[in-house]
Image (tube, grey):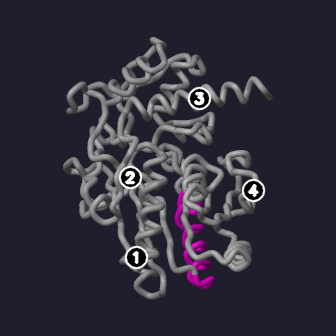
């Protein structure tokens, strides 16, 4: 698991362990945390683009499947630092894919993103919609999807690319969550505002063609997302074909609906400031979510905004406790 010390990767490691899998984690700890990986799990501090290291890890741990989370994910940052994003998300993914092929790895699962669609013409967005990313982040992930497609045709490698919509929440058992302080994800930021860690929550754009004028997004619980990867792994092991699948619930919530849910769950009437639109934000982005159910047999279990918000708040409070203890 690359990026296994990060937000989504750490939840993936927990799901794999709960399923009895043997796991090795590779993470350079640029945004992840060593403590997010259970101490008994083999951990290699290093870079997903380091081919000598990758060859050694794949061989010494007898790796048969790679789940690739490592990468950079902040859309505005990708616009100011495109070359950094193409390096981290495209060049290093190429190195990892090549190392997997050389090392005889037959199964590859990739963290892609709904950002490959750009500003979709209609919602829900199906997997066969036109790919037209408007940020280097989305483009860097689209390129990796293309590399996987072409490599799978030329080599003995099958893959599943999962296009995430808006990932949120935290492990229901409280073992992991989103821990980076400089988060840009709405539910995380709203939880921080509710607990007094931010002076206010800023809402970007109130004049969108949506029911309440704010952006609508398909929020998916991080644990359901991790379980989708587990279903993808089983799909590949059963000999099925490579797939590109949306990962969302197929329905959206507006920014103001999220604000209301966080206020209700936290009991905090935190300040909300209405601002202008941000460039590049689609009015709505909702997954066409039937195909992943049909192909992988995946059934979400935590697809409730109030549940997602309550788990995010519980993790935010847990982080408070860690800070006080240290």
Please say if the residues under marks 3 and 4 sit with CB atoms less than 8 Å apart. Answer: no
Label 2 to label 1, Cα distance in Å?
18 Å
Q: Answer whether residue 244 is visible to the viewer in this image.
A: yes
Q: Which residues are magenta?
A: 83-104
Looking at the rendered structure, the number of numbered marks drawn on it comes to 4
- The picture places residue 240, in percent across and down from the top left corner, at 37, 77
The residue indicated by pointer 4 is 40
Q: Quadrant of residue 255?
A: top left
Residue 83 in view, yes or no: no
Is disc 2 surrounded by few (<14), some (14 to 19) or many (20+) residues within 10 Å? many
User: Which is more foreground, mark 2 or mark 4?
Assistant: 4
Q: Is residue 208 above or below residue 102?
A: above
The residue to which callout 1 is attached is 149
Number of residues whose C-alpha sits closer than 10 Å to that of mark 1, classed few (under 14), some (14–19) or many (20 or more): some
Which sits earlier in the primary sequence, circle 1 or circle 4? 4
| In this rendering, position of residue 243 left or right of residue 124 | right
In the picture of the structure, the residue carrying the numbered disc 3 is: 316
- SS for dot 3: helix
């Amino acid at each position: 698991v690359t990026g296994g010390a990060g937000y989504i990767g750490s939840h993936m490691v927990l799901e794999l362990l709960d399923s009895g899998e043997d796991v090795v984690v590779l993470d350079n700890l640029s945004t992840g945390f060593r403590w997010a990986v259970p101490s008994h799990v083999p951990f290699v501090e290093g870079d997903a683009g380091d081919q000598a290291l990758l060859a050694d890890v794949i061989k010494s741990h007898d790796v048969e499947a790679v789940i690739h989370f490592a990468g950079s994910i902040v859309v505005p940052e990708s616009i100011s630092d495109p070359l950094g994003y193409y390096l981290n998300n495209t060049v290093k993914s190429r190195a990892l894919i090549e190392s997997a092929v050389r090392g005889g790895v037959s199964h590859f699962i990739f963290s892609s993103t709904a950002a490959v669609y750009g500003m979709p013409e209609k919602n829900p967005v199906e997997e066969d919609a036109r790919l037209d990313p408007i940020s280097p982040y989305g483009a860097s992930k689209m390129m990796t999807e293309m590399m996987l497609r072409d490599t799978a045709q030329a080599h003995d490698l099958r893959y599943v690319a999962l296009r995430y919509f808006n990932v949120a929440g935290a492990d229901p058992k409280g073992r992991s969550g989103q821990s980076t302080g400089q988060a840009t994800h709405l539910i995380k930021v709203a939880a921080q505002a509710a607990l007094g860690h931010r002076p206010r929550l800023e809402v970007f754009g109130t004049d969108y063609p949506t029911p309440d004028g704010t952006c609508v997004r398909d929020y998916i619980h991080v644990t359901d997302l991790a379980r989708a990867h587990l279903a993808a792994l089983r799909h590949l092991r059963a000999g099925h074909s490579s797939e590109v699948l949306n990962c969302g619930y197929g329905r959206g919530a507006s920014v103001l609906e999220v604000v209301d849910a966080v206020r209700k769950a936290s009991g905090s009437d935190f300040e909300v400031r209405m601002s202008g639109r941000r460039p590049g934000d689609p009015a709505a982005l909702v997954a066409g979510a039937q195909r992943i159910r049909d192909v992988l047999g995946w059934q979400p279990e935590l697809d409730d905004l109030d549940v997602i918000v309550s788990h995010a708040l519980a993790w935010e409070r847990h982080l408070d406790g860690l800070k006080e203890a240290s």
